[in-house]
Image (cartoon, rainbow, N blue to C red):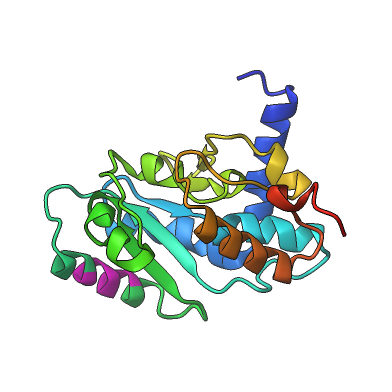
Amino acid sequence: MDPSTPDAVLRRRFVSETLQNPHNAAILERLPLLALPDAWGVAGCLFQTVWNLQAGLPPTAHIKDYDVFYFDGSDLSEAAERQVQARVAALFADLPITLEAKNQARVHLWYEQWFGHPYSALRSSRHGIERFLVPCTCVGLQPGATAEAAPVLHAPYGLEELYAGILRPNPQCPHFALFQAKARSYRDRWHWLVIEDEMDLPA
């Protein structure tokens, strides 16, 4: 990718801003110690840091929890996932945050029970990131191959809508009631966000 293109500039800005949150920086620094397959820091802790900075807030404001995705198809048991969660909790016990680790290989086993919609099996952690309810929130960071390398960014729908504050439903996960609830919870915290399905409604 040409480093001078608007997309490349925005990607560098996103990585730089998300790492201004010291908890995100710690997660990416320590994640390799867990040796989890296909491991990423994802979602709210990343894009909400960006929104905080846009709003002039501390980078950690309003962030309810932090998420790590990994993909281990060799063991789909809940017990195995709990063991990983325990390791994650121990590694990050010094941080004042809630950090959850989810095996994307087993999401389809519990999603319908929790959210009321069937969910087909995922192929990777990237695939899981691509199916968040709001496209602009489909972002993940993975540690670089070396300590000096920049993090790897997965942003399948780009970053323009994230910086513009546009929330719209994701056709890859068309659960509209869940989208509305999620989008409104975001707007309650960052009031300048715009929900697409409400754009043309009368005031």
Q: How many marks?
A: 0
Residue at the image position 74 percent from the left and 46 percent from the top = 163
- The residue most toward the right is 203
Residue at the image position 70 percent from the left and 55 percent from the top = 50
Q: Is residue 115 left or right of residue 135?
A: left
Residue at the image position 60 percent from the left and 20 percent from the top = 1
Q: Is residue 198 left or right of residue 28?
A: right
Which residue is nearer to you in this view: 39 or 118? 118
Q: Is residue 89 magenta?
A: no
Q: Is residue 146 above or below residue 175?
A: above
| Residue 93 image position (x, y, % from top left) | 40, 80
Q: Dividing the picture into quarters, in which one does residue 75 lie?
A: bottom left
Which residue is nearer to you in this view: 62 or 130? 130
Q: Is residue 122 left or right of residue 28?
A: left
Q: Dividing the picture into quarters, in which one does residue 45 lie?
A: bottom right
- The residue most toward the top is 2
Residue 30 visible to the viewer: yes
Helix, strand or loop for the magenta stretch, by majority: helix
Q: Which residues are magenta?
A: 82-88
Q: Is residue 104 above or below residue 10?
A: below
| Residue 24 image position (x, y, % from top left) | 54, 61
Q: Dividing the picture into quarters, in which one does residue 107 lie?
A: bottom left
| Residue 146 image position (x, y, % from top left) | 42, 41
Residue 13 visible to the viewer: no
| Residue 158 image position (x, y, % from top left) | 62, 34
Which residue is nearer to you in this view: 105 or 177? 177
Which residue is nearer to you in this view: 119 or 73? 119
